[in-house]
Image: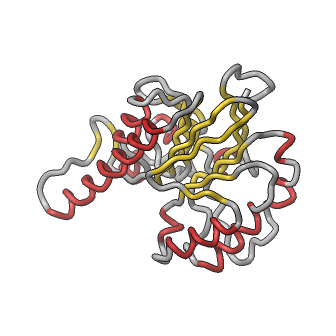
Amino acid sequence: MIRIAAVGDVHLGEDARGRLRPALRRLPEHADVLLLAGDLTRHGTVQEAKVVADEFRDLGVPVVAVLGNHDHHAEAVPELTEVLTEAGVQVLEGDGVVLSVGGARLGVAGVKGFGGGFAGRCASAFGEREMKDFVGHTVDVAAKLRSALDSLDCDERVALTHYSPTPETLRGEPPEIHPFLGAYQLGEAVDATGTDLALHGHAHLGCEHGVTPGGVRVRNVAQPVIRSAFAVYCLRDGAGGCD
C-alpha cells in the first residue's frame, strides 16, 4: 500500500509561520509522501515562500509540489521555486519524479494547469488572438502533463495539478466560473496515460471526490475542502482507512 498525503491552497502569508507545523510533525505515521497542489502562498512573494519552506522542510517523507495561480502573482516563480527546492520540496512543472515507496515505484507528474472549461461549456481557440492564446496555453500545459505522465517508469502513477481535470470536483462552485477552475484537456491527459490518481486544488467551494471521463479517481485537496492539514489517499490495495 502507498499512502499519499496531499493538500493545496494553504495560502501561507508572512503571519502564518508555524500554522501547519504541529499537524505535520507526525506525518510519517500516516503517509509515505506529501503532495502539494499549489497556492502555497498568498501573493507569490519570496518572503511568503520562506514561510512555506519552513513549514514543509524535514518532514521525514518526500515532499513534491506544483505551484498555483497565487504563487505566480508576484512574477517571482524562479526565486520562489529556488527557496522551496533548497528546503527539500521538489517543484514540478511539466516534469515528473519517481519515488521508491515500500518496495514500489510511485511516479508523480505535475503542472500548474490552466482554465478553459469542460465539454459543452468550454472556450475554443477561435476569434481574437487573446482567446487563441488563452486556449493555446491550456493545450500546451495539458500536453506537457501527458508527456510527463507517459515518461514515468513506475508501478503507480499520480497526476498533480492546481487546476481541475474534471467538473465533478467543482460541484458547489458557481457554474459561471468553472472555465477559470480547470479544463477538459487536463482530464484527457490523465485518461490517456494509465494514471491511477489525480490530485488538484484551486476550487475552494468544490467537493473532494470526482472522476475523469475515463473513470480515473480525482480528489480536490484544497484545504477549504478537506478542512485539515492534509488528507491521505491509498494506492494499490486501498486498505488501512485511506480514501
Q: Position of residue 35 (x, y in %)?
A: 64, 48
Q: Residue at x 78, y 72 (%)?
A: 17
Q: Residue at x 60, y 78 (%)?
A: 46
Q: Is residue 110 above or below residue 149?
A: below
Q: Position of residue 113 (x, y in %)?
A: 42, 52
Q: Residue furthest left?
A: 127
Q: Position of residue 207 (x, y in %)?
A: 58, 39
Q: Is residue 166 visible?
A: no
Q: Position of residue 220 (x, y in %)?
A: 58, 42
Q: Tell me the quarter of the picture where residue 66 sits.
A: bottom right
- Compare residues 123 and 233 and report the one nearer the observer: 233
Q: Is residue 213 visible?
A: yes
What colouring does the structure picture have? secondary structure
Badge count:
0
Q: Is residue 168 above or below residue 28?
A: above
Quadrant placement of the N terminus = top right
Quadrant placement of the C terminus = top right
